[in-house]
DNA sequence: TCGCCCTCCTC
DNA sequence: CCATGTGAGGGCGA
């Protein structure tokens, strides 16, 4: 059986939503920013519209660098607010869901989908479905999206990024190897700068070279799991299914301190509201955690963590905050440096929905 | 298994 | 003082 797998991605999502909310922005450079609160314009660019990008603005760039590139350009700098974009995300996903057999959301603005049955394994029919999805989203929400379709998730994902914005790239199964072969390995999901340079060190630059490489060499370089996954993906032979819902395994909050400090207590006071929010979320979603981790980003941006596991899962604001302070103090003592950012993560989540009533019978 | 680190992903 | 925030996965030593 040949699968028909798609990947959809809303173009420059946050900035495009801002344009929809305020169409006058469409003719201006738009930069959606995460302000850290440290100083007037400290923080980074989350995303920017294509006009802003044409002036060299890109994700991850400091806001001040973006300001420099856009000075005198009548640009809009807008603080990012998740809640503002969430409803757009939900409506877009709902539209896609109506046209596919299965949907796997992997981010606020992207998802894999499977249309093998819906399209009777026919790629011509897949094109019609994809165009239909694009049109519906444009009509209903005024948003453009890019879609890629291929025989595996890996191919679909590369295809959706191949042509954008407002793109549609369909790779017929028989064309898979020709499509992938010439592309740089960094196009593969899971290959970032570090992995790409490791591969380059043994002469592998393209996906085609990776596909025909010796798996033992790759395993030696990257470890068993990653090597096998990448080798399969490079051959267009990854067989991962589109899975409806992936339950969260952890959640975390991290904040930037007003100023660097080596005092655990000082850092703790700024972190406390975030800990309370985590506790509230755990409560509302019915979780307790077996592991609590405190994260410290030092002045030199290196990251250190300190974690502890509990026999009995914890979830109350009081216990979570107490343990956060304990771990933060221990971390502070072990690093002998100032914190720039601190965070807290809960993992090994245990479902405790209905536990309260269950306890009555114990 | 635990604790810690690294790498990657998205915007 | 330019350098956010969230989550997944895996390697490795003890």
Image (cartoon, coloured by chain):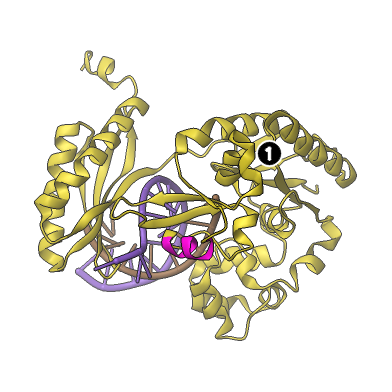
Chain colours: A yellow, B brown, C purple
Q: Of A207 and A21, which appears nearest the observer?
A: A21
Q: Which residues are magenta?
A: A64-70
Q: Residue at x 30, y 67 (%)?
A: A301
Q: Is residue A124 visible?
A: yes
In the picture of the structure, the residue carrying the numbered disc 1 is: A143
Question: Along the horizontal axis of the image, is A228 left or right of A351?
Answer: right
Question: Along the horizontal axis of the image, is C11 left or right of A192?
Answer: left
> Please, which residue is most extreme toward the right here?
A124
The answer for which chain carries disc 1 is: A
Q: Residue at x 55, y 85 (%)?
A: A201
> Please, which residue is most extreme toward the front here?
A72
Q: Give the prevailing secondary structure in the magenta stretch.
A: helix
* Helix, strand or loop at mark 1: loop
Q: Position of residue A311 (x, y in %)?
A: 19, 41
Tag 1: Cα neighbours inside 10 Å, few (<14), some, or many (≥20)?
many
Q: Quadrant of residue A154?
A: bottom right
Q: Position of residue A97 (x, y in %)?
A: 68, 31
Position of residue A267 relative to residue A19, above or below, is below
Q: Position of residue A8 (x, y in %)?
A: 68, 45
Q: Residue at x 34, y 25 (%)?
A: A284
Q: Position of residue A191 (x, y in %)?
A: 56, 67
Q: Is residue A111 visible?
A: no
Find out whether residue A67 is within the magenta segment: yes
Question: Along the horizontal axis of the image, is A116 left or right of A198?
Answer: right
């Amino acid at each position: 059986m040949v699968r028909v797998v798609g990947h959809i991605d809303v173009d420059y999502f946050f900035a495009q939503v801002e344009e929809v909310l305020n169409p006058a922005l469409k003719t201006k450079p738009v930069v959606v920013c995460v302000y850290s609160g440290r100083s007037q314009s400290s923080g980074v660019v989350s995303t920017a519209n294509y006009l802003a990008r044409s002036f060299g603005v890109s994700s991850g760039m400091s806001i001040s660098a973006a300001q420099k590139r856009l000075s005198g350009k009548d640009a809009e700098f807008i603080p990012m607010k998740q809640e503002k974009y969430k409803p757009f995300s939900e409506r877009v996903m709902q539209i896609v869901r109506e046209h596919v057999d299965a949907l796997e959301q992997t981010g606020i603005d992207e998802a894999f989908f499977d249309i093998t049955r819906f399209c009777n394994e026919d790629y011509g029919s897949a094109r019609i479905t994809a165009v239909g999805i694009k049109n519906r989203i444009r009509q209903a929400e005024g948003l453009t999206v890019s879609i890629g379709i291929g025989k595996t998730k890996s191919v679909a994902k590369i295809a959706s990024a191949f042509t954008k914005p407002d793109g549609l790239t369909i790779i017929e199964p028989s064309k898979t190897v020709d499509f992938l072969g010439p592309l740089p390995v960094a196009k593969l999901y899971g290959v970032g700068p570090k992995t790409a340079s490791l591969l380059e060190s043994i002469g592998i630059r393209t996906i085609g070279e990776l596909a025909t490489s010796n798996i033992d060499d790759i395993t030696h370089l990257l470890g068993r799991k990653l090597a096998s996954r990448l080798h399969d993906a490079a051959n267009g032979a990854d067989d991962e299914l589109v899975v409806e819902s992936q339950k969260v395994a952890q959640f975390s909050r991290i904040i930037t301190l007003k100023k660097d400090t080596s005092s655990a207590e000082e850092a703790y006071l700024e972190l406390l509201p975030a800990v309370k929010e985590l506790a509230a979320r755990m409560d509302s979603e019915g979780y307790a955690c077996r592991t609590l981790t405190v994260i410290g980003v030092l002045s030199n941006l290196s990251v250190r963590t300190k974690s502890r596991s509990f026999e009995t899962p914890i979830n109350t604001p009081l216990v979570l905050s107490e343990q956060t302070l304990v771990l933060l103090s221990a971390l502070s003592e072990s690093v002998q440096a100032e914190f720039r950012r601190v965070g807290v993560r809960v993992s090994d989540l245990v479902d405790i929905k209905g536990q309260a009533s269950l306890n009555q019978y114990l």
